[in-house]
Amino acid sequence: MGKITIKNRKGQKMVVVVDHAEHPKGLAFVMHGLGSSKDSPRIQLIAQTFNEKGFTAVRFDTTNTFGESDGNYEDATITNYYEDLEDAIAWAKNQPWHQEPYILAGSSLGGICVTLYAEAHPQEVRALAPIAPVISGALRIEASNRRDPGRFERWKAAGYEDEQSEKVPGLMKRLKYSHVEDSMQYDTLPGAKKLTMPVLLIVGSEDDITPPDHVQKLFDAIPAGKKELHVIKGMGHAFKEEYFPQVRAIFERWIDTV
């Protein structure tokens, strides 16, 4: 494993981990979601599965998250996450271990970023694996309104939203409303016709943040071909360790087909 510090287009520090394969069959980038990190057990699980299957795996902390890169969580947007993905890939293209086409995998907000990248650069992407992906800014709001109809009005009125961290007791996560405004310009559905590479979609049946019916919309918009949608019974959005064996098994079988 190699940990490297690079700079993004804004001159901010980004920390990247490269898990090298001895005789690499290919390259895979694995991207975390909002407020998560490259060291999330879920991200490590996916990267490790690629690595065990003979792929060099790259994972990185975007800026404006709770990892080792620069920035503040309250400034996080899809735009900044997507640009950091672009910058990580651009950096990798100049490394001796780079291989193209490569595989992209991402969770939640990372899921929409890798999907948008694959739509913009389909010739570079060997296969795509969005896990519990955000489908669009508008659908994200729709899902939130199912859980809490007044949330976005309160968020807009205050200019920010505070949320108790599930992982760190006592940590209050603040996110500006500009995050919501930024997200409204993004939608994976119009460009889904360009996703002609193998695509693996995974979502939990109990996911109320990126619900199965929203992920189904993306699946339906992708051209017929090597596409899969797995809805894991009982699983929520940030899937817990009890679901790791199922997710790993799906990835192991899928990687063998791409």
Image (tube, helix red, strand yellow):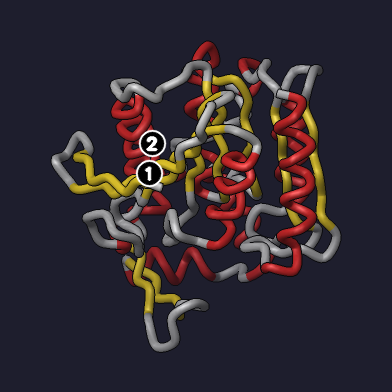
Residue 16 is left or right of residue 29, and the answer is left
Crowd rating for badge 2 (residues with CA inside 10 Å; few <14, some 14–19, many 20+): many
Relative to 252, is 117 above or below? above
Element on which disc 1 rests: helix
Measuring 61% from the left and 70% from the top, which residue is drawn there? 148
How far across and down, in percent of the image, does residue 106 sit? 55, 43
**Which residue corresponds to mark 1?**
81
Measuring 58% from the left and 24% from the top, which residue is drawn there? 25
Which amino acid type corresponds to the residue marked 1 in the rendered image? Tyr
How far across and down, in percent of the image, does residue 113 sit? 48, 37
Q: Which residue, as the protein is rendered here, is positioned at the far left?
A: 11
Viewer-side residue, 2 vs 165: 2
Which amino acid type corresponds to the residue marked 2 in the rendered image? Leu
Residue 182 in view here: no
Residue 109 is left or right of residue 97, and the answer is right
| Label number found at residue 257 | none
Q: Which residue, as the protein is rendered here, is positioned at the far front?
A: 22
Q: Quadrant of residue 34?
A: bottom left
Viewer-side residue, 20 vs 106: 20
Observer-side mark, 2 or 1, equals 2
Residue 232 in view here: yes
Q: Which residue, as the protein is rendered here, is positioned at the far bottom?
A: 170
Relative to 196, is 240 above or below? below
**Which residue corresponds to mark 2?**
85
Measuring 39% from the left and 25% from the top, which residue is drawn there? 97
Residue 174 is left or right of residue 112, and the answer is left
Mark 2–mark 1 Cα distance, whole angstroms, equals 6 Å
Element on which disc 2 rests: helix
Crowd rating for badge 1 (residues with CA inside 10 Å; few <14, some 14–19, many 20+): many
